Structures are given as C-alpha cells and as structure tokens.
Amino acid sequence: MHAKPHVLVLGSNFAGLASAQRIRDYAGDAADITVIDRRDYLLYNPNIPVDIFENRDPELHERMPLRPVLVEDDIEFVQAEVQGIDVDAQVVTFLPNERPGAEQERLHYDYLIIALGARLAYERIEGFAEHGHTLSDFYHGNRLREYLHEGGYRGGPIAIGSARFHQGDGAEGLEPYPGGSIPVAEAACEGPPLEATMAMATWLKDHGQGTPDRITVFTPAEVIAEDAGLNNVRQFLELAGSMGIHYLNKTIDIRRLTAEGIEFENGETLEAELKIVLPDWVAHDFLRDLPISDSQGFIKTDLLMRNPDYPNVFAAGDAAAVTVPKIGGIGHQEADIVARQVAKELGRLDAEEADHPLRPVIFCIGDMGDGKAFYIRSNTWYGGNDEVLKVGRIPYQLKMRYRDLFFLTHGKLPDWGLGLAQFTAEKLFG
Ligand SMILES: Cc1cc2nc3c(=O)[nH]c(=O)nc-3n(C[C@H](O)[C@H](O)[C@H](O)COP(=O)(O)OP(=O)(O)OC[C@H]3O[C@@H](n4cnc5c(N)ncnc54)[C@H](O)[C@@H]3O)c2cc1C
C-alpha cells in the first residue's frame, strides 16, 4: 500500500535509472517510487567493445551496483523478472529472482514508466552459436576478447555488421522537427559495427596480424548508420575506404553464419573467419499485443513519451517505439521528458517547465584504437540541421571520462557534462 501516488519504473539500466532519479529530482517527495529490474547492477555496455580490443575483462569494469545508488534517492528496488502488465487494472506482475522458487507478485501503480530495453535476438541468426561473435554483453565480449588475445584468430577475413531490424508502426506520423519524422531504420544500432571496424583495423596493425583490407563492414540498408547523417557517413566511408576496408550494403538481412562466412538474404555470400554481428533488436514477448504496444511490441508514445491511450503510462529508451535508432543517448533525453511529465502530473512542475517534446539527437563516440575515437552529433535524419563528425584523441578521452563520470556521480551526470563534452569535441579541439 502506498500513501502517496506510486510511480513504478520497469527496468533500471540507462533509461530506467535516469527516469527514476529525475522523477525524484523534479517531483521531490510527492511520490513513492519503485524500480524493478532482473539485475541489481547497471550494465555499461557502450564500453564493452573498447574493453575487448584493449584486453580488459568488461565484467570487472562495466557494472555499477544499483541498490546503493537507488537508496540515495529513497527509491525502492525489487530484483525480479517482470512478467506482465495489466494497463486497465494498473497492475504489474513479476517474479522475484533472488532465489528460485519465489511466488509471483503484483504491484499497483498510479504512473508506469516502461524502460525495459529490447532483446538482442541472437537466437534468430542461424549458425550464430557455432560461428558468430559479438560485443554486446559480458559473456560474448569475453569470448571475443579471448579469441583475439589468446591466439584464436588465424589471420583470415573479418566481417562486421548487422542483421535487419523490424521497426513497428508506433512512431508513424510524429514530427520531432518541423517537416521531419521518425524514419524507418533497417538496422537497430550501427554505431557498434562502425566502432568495431575501426578498432579492429588498429588491432590488426598493433598485433602484427595484417592490414585493414581483411575487414568488410556490411549493412542491411542502403547506407550504413544513415541516422548519423549522410554527410558524416560519407566522410566515415571515405576514411574507411582509404584504409582499405571493404563496404557491402543492401544485404537485406543475415540468412545464416557458417564456418566459411556469411550468407545474406540478397543471395550474396561473404567469406569470413571472424564474424562480428549485431542481431535484430526485438521487443520483449510479454509486451507484444498489449493495448499500449505497436505492431512489433514497442511501446507507443507521443513526443512527450506518453502513451496516447493510457496517459499514465510512459516509455523511455529502447523499449519505446520512437527510440530509433536504439541508442542510450536518446533514452537519456527521453528519461528527462518522462520525469518532467510525471512531476507535472504530481503538481511539482508547470506545463512550461514540463512540456518539452523529444527532439532526438544522435550522439555517438566510437573507439578507433590507439587512443583515438570518432565523435558524431547529428539530427538531420529527423529533419534537423546539425551534422558534426570529429576524429582524434579528444573524443577517445571523452568516451572514457564520460563513463568514469557516470559511475562517480551514480548516473547523475550534470547537465553541463554533455554540453562540456560537445564544446570540447567540437569547438576547443575540433
Ligand atoms: C555494443 C554496444 C555499444 C553501444 N554503444 C552505445 C553508445 O556508445 N552510445 C549510445 O548512446 N548507445 C550505445 N549502445 C546502445 C545502448 O546500449 C542502448 O540503447 C541502451 O542500453 C538502452 O538503454 P535502456 O535503458 O533503454 O535499455 P537497456 O540498457 O536494455 O536496459 C533494460 C533494463 O531492463 C531490464 N529488463 C529487461 N527485461 C526485463 C524483465 N522482463 N524483467 C526485469 N528486468 C528486465 C534489463 O535487465 C536492463 O537493466 C550500444 C549498444 C551496444 C550493444
């Protein structure tokens, strides 16, 4: 039972943690806040690739315990598997997973924030278990790290790219910038393949394993990472091409991985000893077919991150239909919007302070090895006018220090942190 309105946040990685913390920040003591997550730590996955190439165990570097962080803001934490949402009864069912044998429980909410991310569907890629590598989690990250650094790699061709993403209809008709839209993406998140391509080229050189022309980067789409801005991508491909890296587009999808390489849905095959792939990012099964979900199970919202049919239900991060591509930076922008909306509902912010609709911006910093990185900031894909690409040592430092600052502040990066990063990358050392 809750004496105050009960805000229930599902998921506590980037979008969920930021939503819960900012609701407390904007709404003060006006609500009881509960967070449910199956893990009791935050997984800082953007830095798993750099750990792999620099031969560090990401399990030891990229996790932040959640319990001590949440207790600072008087936010209750339940470690459990969320199993269902009844949006009419305003009830969430979940199974505590601290120990096997727990009984299913139910929690009532007044406001619900869905920040459960997406499922990276490796099981949908035939041959992945036997022949594939990836860099999205601790297990696969360490498998690839050991393959590279403990003598597994035999010097053969390398293929890096994504399977096809199946976007739902939940963001149709939204206009984040005048005359713009949330376009349809054919890959969920192509920053990691771009980053892995450049870092792999450096790794080959630094380890005397060959030249970058062993690598092919591929995409199901017409243009890789087109959400990062066509001008940025053109410059990036020119740089990769000048290094000898091959580029394959319009593969449509990955049909299967074999010991010899990759078979694509467009009929082409690519010879590869090492296959580093990102899969389709799909909605969690229990979110499909809910009255708040789109045709693929992502949560429908307007640009204030509020479900149009159930106005006390919000979404942030990869679980939201408007989050395309699926990147943490957009989830962070959305968490702030959600928190302002909830604080408005609770009478702690007025409409002028709260109603700032989503204007998505792609921020991406990708490791390139040897202490260098690329920095991208763009909103042109959505109808905006900004497109910036910088390459050098400062972006690398920003990438590493951003993570340090995130852990140090328990996820509460000061607003000036991003502004300072942008200023440093683009003006001071641009
Ligand atoms: C290799 C890689 C590198 C990346 N690099 C970048 C980058 O540089 N910059 C960037 O902006 N983005 C990057 N991304 C994307 C970024 O990681 C995601 O967009 C981000 O994690 C999404 O945050 P989220 O909180 O919405 O979802 P998630 O991070 O997926 O978190 C979802 C949370 O919900 C919990 N959960 C899920 N289902 C349940 C359930 N049924 N019950 C209980 N808990 C559940 C999970 O345990 C998790 O804590 C990268 C992704 C990958 C794979």
Image (tube, rainbow, N blue to C red):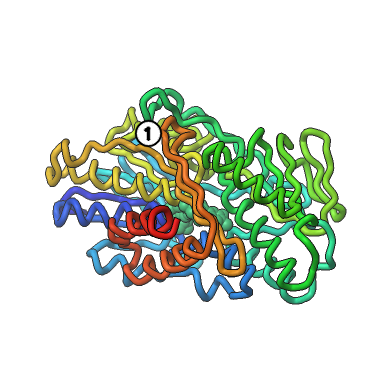
Residue drawn at the location 19% of the way across and 48% of the way down: 5
Q: Quadrant of the N terminus?
A: bottom left
Depicted 346 relative to depicted 399: above or below: above
The one nearer the camera, 185 or 20, is 185
Say which element carries label 1.
loop
- The x, y position of residue 184, in whole percent, is 54, 31
Confirm whether residue 413 shows in the render: yes
Q: Amino acid at mark 1?
A: Thr
Mark 1 beta carbon near ligand 1 (under 8 Å): no
- The x, y position of residue 271, in whole percent, is 85, 50
**In the drawing, does residue 182 fall left or right of residue 369?**
left
Q: Quadrant of the C terminus?
A: bottom left
- The x, y position of residue 397, in whole percent, is 47, 67
Confirm whether residue 95 shows in the render: no
Residue drawn at the location 37% of the way across and 39% of the way down: 86
The one nearer the camera, 298 or 141, is 141
- The x, y position of residue 209, in whole percent, is 79, 69
Res. 374 image quadrant: bottom right
Res. 187 image quadrant: top right
Residue drawn at the location 42% of the way across and 39% of the way down: 386
Residue position for label 1 = 301
**In the drawing, does residue 139 fall left or right of residue 213?**
left
The one nearer the camera, 7 or 159, is 159
**In the drawing, does residue 268 fall left or right of residue 398?**
right
Residue drawn at the location 16% of the way across and 36% of the way down: 351
User: What is the total number of numbered labels drawn onto the structure image?
Assistant: 1
Depicted 189 relative to depicted 176: above or below: below
The one nearer the camera, 83 or 9, is 9
Q: Residues within 10 Å of mark 1 (few under 14, many from 20)?
A: many
